[in-house]
Image (tube, rainbow, N blue to C red):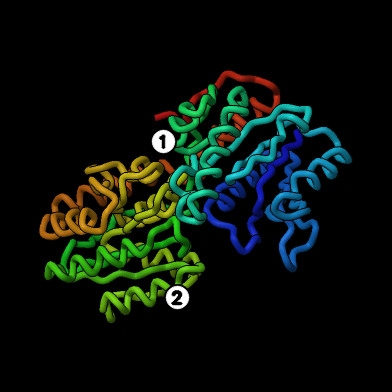
Amino acid sequence: MRFLMLNWRDPKNPLAGGAERVTQAYLAALVQRGHEVYWYANQFAGAPAEETIEGIHIIRGGGVGGSIFKAIKWYRLQLPFQLVIDQHHGIAWFAPWWCRTQCIAYLHEVLGPIWDTFYSPPVAAFGRWQDRWTHWLYRRVPFWTACESTRDGLHGHGVQNVTIIRYGVHTRALPVLDAKPLSAPLRLAVVCRLAPNKRVNHCLQTLAELRQRGVPARLTVVGGGELEAALRQEAASLQLGDAIKFTGLLSEADKDLILREAHLLLHTSVREGWGLNVIEANALGTPAVVYPVAGLRESTLHDQTGLVAPQETPAALADCLARLLGDDARYQRYRRGAWERAQTMHWDRILPAACDWFEARARGETAGPKMIPKL
């Protein structure tokens, strides 16, 4: 069968992130099953118009606002596809109205407050309205997403059919959970793109709050992005000194080493589709302490695989951390729960059933599990 993914970014786009990592994993699995898979994305500086990544045919054309028309023109010259996947990132591709074949929509999160972190109030308000209008327009199109919060948000906007397919991770869980007692200083880690919606400044403020309370702690920030200079400046104004370290972008091996050595991962994003780095940390024996937002409250099970703070404030996050310090038995329970759950989230466990579902959709079948893996 022939599959087409429509996504503004491909894996080599400088702005690619977790959405592209998981998309690549699903599509590469379809290639391994013998299918022909294409991925249409925006052009960007220095990129060839076509290339192949893990057997996936990457086609690039057009830019913001124009790539839809380029995609339609390209599509009309191709052999028929059995399934087109319309991946939404703020703006949809409107493929159900021009692809003339089986079509499903793929959404990581209902953006909601994320609009406010990037745009002025009038533009953000338009973005939220546009989201609701688009989801209503797509209300009869089958959707696929990663977590219950996004499913519920789509249902709230009128979408009728949503299947949850969990994101997997490439990180292999430790074969044996190693010893890591919870002792001062707390070793904390943040792993994400340094962008406004990630609110990494809240992690810096959490560290400052802990230090003001006399709780010894250190924070390592892994990642790059447009806010790195501003975050470094804020760390200086908070007088964090050598208690904080910015590593920039790292290799997967170096990132995993930091995650494994950390006591806890912090995640303070406005909203997530799932929270890949939470499960990656869990696989390495590191629980997470997160904000109570969509995606993160699913990737971290409160009081089982980590902690979900009661409010979206640095003070609430600091309270969770301070109360946990000195309770090593509870910490070790979180470690084990996180590690055991992460073993069920490797791609080897996710992809077979996910590909079955994609193939069924390509054949026009509508029945199937509403959650993959079944829990």
Residue situated in front as seen by the camera: 318 or 111: 111
| Disc 2 secondary structure class | helix
Which of the marked residues, 1 or 2, is nearer the chain's N terminus? Answer: 1
- Residue 161 vs residue 77: left or right? left
Q: Residue at x 67, y 43 (%)?
A: 32
3D distance between C-alphas at marks 1 and 2: 33 Å
Residue 174 visible to the viewer: no
Q: Residue at x 49, y 25 (%)?
A: 370
Q: Residue at x 61, y 28 (%)?
A: 138
Residue beneath disc 2:
229
Q: Give the image location of residue 356, x and y in percent.
A: 60, 30
Residue beneath disc 1:
149
Q: Give the image location of residue 77, x and y in percent.
A: 89, 40
* Amino acid on which the number 2 mark rests in the picture: Ala
Residue furthest out toward the right: 77
Q: Residue at x 51, y 68 (%)?
A: 226
